[in-house]
């Protein structure tokens, strides 16, 4: 029992360390992502400022080039200036328009990058930060799984500790009266010996009195030892009983039917009617005419044989199972269950 508690405690400590590692790594990734986003925001803001200034300048240049083009156009129509001057003004206006449109596109792109950066999304092709976000999502998932296993192991350890406390508990309610009988009998014998055998003097009577007194003391002593010795662990008895069982699980589209190969108060082995896929999430076993309880898969063999540990057994189900195993004369033959399921 203590070795099982030590194993559960070691598993708990390992899972606690794993959860801490996940939390620390996620914190580092969060800080790295935040640092890069902050630096990227400053860079994008500066670029947006420069692009806006250039765009404003390009707007002025384009407006001036357009006015020059319109003036040269009028002059060319009136014959005041040459057609070549008009075409040159048109070319300069086209260049200024293209430059304005280019800077307008740069401003729009920088603004879009700033908006995306505020949401933790990068559009500049930086590969480390998207990986950091993906890694954080993965760490969140693994941390949740580790915490669920940690809670399960803590529940198992607490159950083992309660069982150990029950096994090692001293039955003081009975032991105190047995000790009183032992002490009273010993004091009575001592008084009789010191009183010069006043009541019984014949040797045969003395032998009979001492014999029966010794036998009484022996019985009381054995009873007293029974109060402080470990209680017989009936939870370890395993019975070869065939009981109809139905397994339900979130990972299963429909319940699986089977029959127990062996069963105890703490676990059971079940042979199902079909191969059992990988199980995840909360498991529930319903025993026909007994009741339902939560369970944890321990191991499996040959695809159809799966062994479970019964956890958080309701009192009604536990009482019905106890009655079926130990009070039902219809079955026989049991073997001790070695180790935890």
Image (tube, grey):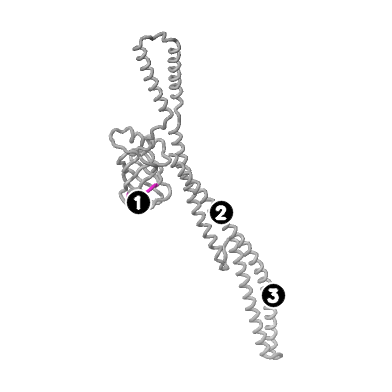
What residue is shown at x 53% (from left), y 57% (from top)?
A: 136
**Circle 1 residue:** 276
**Is the residue under label 2 in contact with that under label 1 (CB below 8 Å)?**
no
**Circle 2 residue:** 24
Q: How far from the left and from the top, in percent, is residue 325?
A: 33, 36
Q: Quadrant of the C terminus?
A: top left
Q: How far from the left and from the top, in percent, is residue 90?
A: 65, 84
**Spatial separation of the CA atoms under disc 1 and disc 2:** 37 Å
Left or right placement of residue 156 versus residue 78 in this view? left
Inspect the magenta stretch and tell me whether residue 65 lies in it.
no
**Is the residue under label 2 in contact with that under label 3 (CB below 8 Å)?**
no
Range of residues picked out in magenta: 297-304
Is label 3 in a helix, a strand or a loop? helix
Q: Mark 1 or mark 2: name the one nearer the start of the chain.
A: 2
In front of the other: 284 or 84? 284
Crowd around label 1: few <14 · some 14–19 · many ≥20 (10 Å): some
What residue is shown at x 62% (from left), y 67% (from top)?
A: 111
Disc number for residue 75:
none
- Residue farthest to the top? 198
Q: Mark 3 or mark 2: name the one nearer the start of the chain.
A: 2
User: Main SS type for the magenta part?
Assistant: strand
**188 relative to 296, above or below:** above
Mark 1 or mark 2, whichever is nearer to me: 2
**Circle 3 residue:** 57
**Is the residue under label 1 in contact with that under label 3 (CB below 8 Å)?**
no
Is label 2 in a helix, a strand or a loop? helix
In front of the other: 252 or 328? 328
**Spatial separation of the CA atoms under disc 3 and disc 1:** 72 Å
**138 relative to 248, above or below:** below
């Amino acid at each position: 029992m203590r070795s099982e508690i030590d194993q559960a405690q070691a598993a708990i400590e390992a899972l606690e360390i794993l959860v801490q590692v996940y939390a620390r790594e996620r914190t580092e990734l969060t800080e790295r992502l935040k640092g890069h986003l902050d630096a990227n925001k400053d860079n994008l803001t500066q670029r947006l400022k420069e692009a806006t200034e250039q765009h404003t300048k390009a707007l002025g240049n384009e407006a001036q080039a357009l006015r020059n083009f319109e003036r040269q156009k009028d002059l060319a129509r009136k014959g005041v200036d040459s057609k070549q001057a008009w075409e040159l003004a048109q070319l300069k206006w086209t260049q200024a328009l293209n430059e304005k449109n280019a800077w307008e596109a740069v401003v729009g792109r920088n603004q879009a990058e700033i908006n995306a950066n505020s949401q933790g999304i990068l559009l500049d092709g930086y590969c480390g930060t998207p990986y950091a976000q993906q890694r954080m999502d993965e760490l969140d998932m693994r941390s949740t799984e580790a915490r669920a296993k940690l809670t399960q192991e803590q529940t198992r350890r607490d159950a083992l500790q309660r069982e150990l406390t029950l096994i090692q508990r001293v039955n003081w309610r009975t032991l105190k009266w047995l000790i009183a009988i032992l002490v009273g009998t010993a004091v009575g014998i001592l008084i009789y010996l010191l009183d010069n055998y006043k009541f019984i003097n014949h040797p045969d009577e003395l032998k009979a009195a001492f014999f029966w007194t010794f036998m009484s003391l022996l019985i009381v002593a054995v009873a007293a030892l029974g109060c402080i010795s470990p209680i017989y662990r009936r939870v370890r008895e395993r019975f070869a009983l065939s009981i109809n069982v139905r397994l339900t699980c979130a990972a299963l589209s429909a319940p699986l039917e089977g029959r127990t190969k062996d069963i105890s108060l703490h676990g059971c082995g079940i042979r199902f009617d079909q191969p059992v896929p990988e199980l995840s999430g909360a498991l529930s076993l319903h025993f026909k005419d007994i009741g339902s309880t939560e369970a944890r898969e321990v191991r499996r063999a040959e695809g159809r044989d799966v062994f479970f540990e019964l956890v958080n057994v309701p009192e009604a189900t536990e009482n019905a199972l106890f009655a079926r195993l130990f009070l039902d004369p219809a079955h026989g033959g049991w073997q001790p269950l070695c180790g935890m399921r």
